[in-house]
Amino acid sequence: MHSVMVDGLQMAYLVPVKAEGLRAAFRSLWHRAYKRVEAVRSVSFSVAPGEVVGFIGPNGAGKTTTLKILSGVLHPTAGRVEVVGHTPWERRPAYLRQIAMIRGSRPLAAPVELTVQDALRFQQLIYEVPEAQFRRTLGLLVEMLHLEPLLQRQIRALSLGEKMRAGLAWSLVYQPRVLFLDEPTLGLDVTAAQLMRRFVGTYSRETGATVLLTSHYMADVESLCRRILLIDKGHMTYDGDLAGLSARMAPFKLLKVAGGDPGLDWSRFGDVVEQEGGRVSLRVRREAVPAVTARLLAEVASIADLTVTEPPLESVIDQVYREGV
Amino acid sequence: MRLLRILGRVLALSVQRELAHRVNLTISVTMMVIDLAASVATLGLVFTQTATLAGWRPAEALALLGAFQLVTGLLNTFIEPNLAWFAEKVTGGRLDDTLLQPVPSFFMLSLGACQPLALPRVLLGGALLVWATVAGEGVTALGVAGCVALLAAGVVITWAVRVLLATLAFWAPGFEPSVLFSAFWQLGRYPVGVYHPVVRQLLTYVVPVAFVATFPAEALMRGGGGLGLGLGALGAGAALLALGAAGLAWRAGVRRYTGATS
Amino acid sequence: MRLLGGYVRRYFLQWLAWRSFALTLVANQAVTPLVGLAVWSTVLPERRLSDYFIALLFVRLLTSSYENHTFSEWVYQGGFCDDLLLPHPPVLVTLGENIAIRIWHIIIGLPIVAAVVLFAPPSLRWQDVALALPAVVLAAAIRFLFTYALALSAFWIERAHSVVGLGSTLIFLLGGEAAPIALLPDAVRPWAEALPFRAMLGFPAEIAAGELNGAAVGMGYLWQVIWLAVMVVAAQAVWRAGIRRYTVVGG
């Protein structure tokens, strides 16, 4: 049983090559040079209903292209895709009514002159939502997203954070079963981003909606996604949980120790990363962590505190993007 | 039916939006009246020098101007807000939003927005037509019917041609057909008979502005004796043909955009 | 002057990117003289009005002004306050773009003029054309100042487009475009000859088409010089009042 199934996806397109300088620009009026861009080369995965999956990868990796194919906007060069039983690019109304695409770059794609309420009503008409269901869903969304004060305001006058909240309601008022979120927290302040993350998590849990999201903010992925797909230069290079990626990329953990005698030689236990006052950070291979901890506790009498931490996620991801898995 | 309801809602929302800016409304209507007065004055100038313009008497030319203004009003209200600068919408991602909606993209993109500020022009054009009907001699019921049918055909043809031109953006994103269209459109204010024969053919068959003004006015003012019927049949045929072509081109364009053919 | 050249160059390159928009503008500039050509040639075939309208087309391309698109929009979008920081009169920016757009108009418009000449070969005499050239320059200057002054209304109202549009309608009716000035009814003609609209458009075309005798040419030039002076004063006055308002109200 799967909600999204992607098999051997490939997408290539031609883009015009922009010429430099005035003469070349004139020449390009008549002769356009094109180059073939392989946006997605081989991507296969499947997602179960209700799963929240994060798509990560450096800029230009093919994440957005994949989302566009899944939402039916683009037709792939090769491969098979099934989302809730439909082939997306046939763009059947029955399919389009079950999905939502939410972009952080343009969270609310409705005419800016409308009020939020009018835009929502228009969605009701477009997506044929029965009145009773519309009222019920809208009531819930208004409560969860604190939309009450925004309903009568013009979209033009909303701040980015407000636009994102209204945009979520706008995209979810027809209760889609699959959500594609493209950089949903782009440009949001800390509070708005947190609200957004909490909301998406709750929404998925309560409605059983499947969520695929791309983001460059690890906080999004960390708090929402049990599973991540890493995509790089059009290839899928990792499918699993964040901890697994971390373990693979960074085979070390940090042991932070407070206390101990001043003259103690810490390097017996691991690489000393930092030593300051009575605190020491030691780098230890993952598999050795239990043994080293035991030794520390046994051999060093005056330990006041000891913690084991993962290396910071951002630095792991940075390493992944630069060097690959 | 549902499409009609969506269209109605689009119009209602837009009217509601524009009524909020009463100053803009007043200025637009004033400008429209001035523009129309200038057109009528120009016709007046022409007829100080001659009794007929390419065989058209003053009342007939007035009817033609009325038909032109009426269809221009409809064009600017319902069609141009969607299809002008369409290439930008394709490259800017607006097309994606529409493709995601469970409503035919052809419909949403060519009629999904409107500009009610242009609507008064329809009324002004209609008023000119009535004026011409009163001033002209020998206007028959058959002529009026033929004129209405041809105006409807003219609107459909305009819509279809505009869609056809817009779909060019799928193949040549740098090319903006609004250019040629708006310029050629202006030629419709006079009988096509005043233009060079080559231009006349162009205006009848390629950018069919003749169907918008010349033919309806002809049907209205000289529509007795079957001319109206004949023109009406021609208009209906041309409208169906244009609409079919527009639908096919649209589908091919969207297929190309989504990469289905490459 | 070097500064102005710099702006012309900069906007010339910028408009390279907007060439399809430029094409729209040119097509719309060209269409009314061409319609006039068709209509009036049908009405009065014996008067050879095609010379006049071809000259008019050329004058129109050379004198086109879009300060409502360039300047007023710039004010509405809030970019104008940057211009006030410039260490030279901000009008240079607007004038530079105006000239750049006119250069583009000529580049894009030449094929149109060539096509028209093929369809309706004109019989212009080079002496007349040479005599008209200074008038074209004057007309271009008056037209710029006129449109600029109207576009400055953006400091007060949100609909500067309509104000400039009203100006264009007057130029169309009384400037020799709807009908050559000589064909206007007797009650209107003397006014049309003296008003600035002819000085901006119809007058150079009349000289080029060889429709004026020596005295009429002299009179026309006199009117052009007078109107140029008036427009300079008027544009400056509006500018000062506008800036005062802008810096007080903050746009």
Image (spheres, helix red, strand yellow):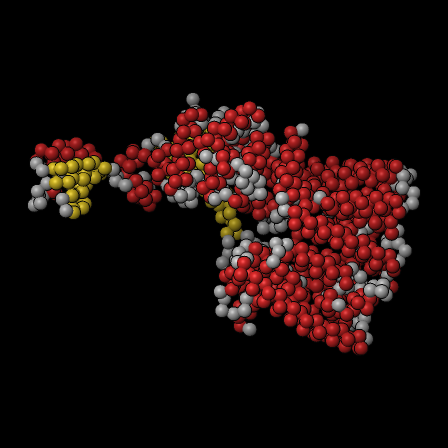
Q: Which sits in the foreground, A243 or C228?
A: C228
Q: Is residue C201 above or below residue A212?
A: below
Q: Is residue B196 left or right of residue C200?
A: right
The residue drawn where x is 53% and y is 61% is C248
Rendering quarter of residue B236: top right
Q: What residue sits 75% from the left and 54% below the top?
A: B34
Quadrant the N terminus of chain A occupies: top left
Question: B54 or C93: nearer the eye?
Answer: C93
Give the side of residue B42 with respect to residue B135, left or right. Answer: left
| C198, above or below B226, in the image | below
Which residue of the protein is positioned furthest toward the top in this rendering?
A1
Q: How many marks?
A: 0
Q: Is residue A256 above or below residue C86?
A: above
From the viewer's side, name the closer residue of A180 and C41. A180
Quadrant occupied by the C terminus of chain A: top left
Residue A137, position in %: x, y?
A: 50, 27
Q: Position of residue B30 (x, y in %)?
A: 72, 51
Query: For this rendering, which residue is in front, B33 or B231?
Result: B33
**Quadrant housing residue B74:** top right
Q: Position of residue A307 (x, y in %)?
A: 19, 36
Residue sitting farthest toward the front: C248
From the viewer's perspective, tell me whether residue A287 is left or right of residue B259. left
Residue depicted at 28% across the width and 37% down the height: A246
Q: Is residue A238 visible?
A: no
Q: Residue at x 66, y 52 (%)?
A: B179
Residue A147 visible to the viewer: yes
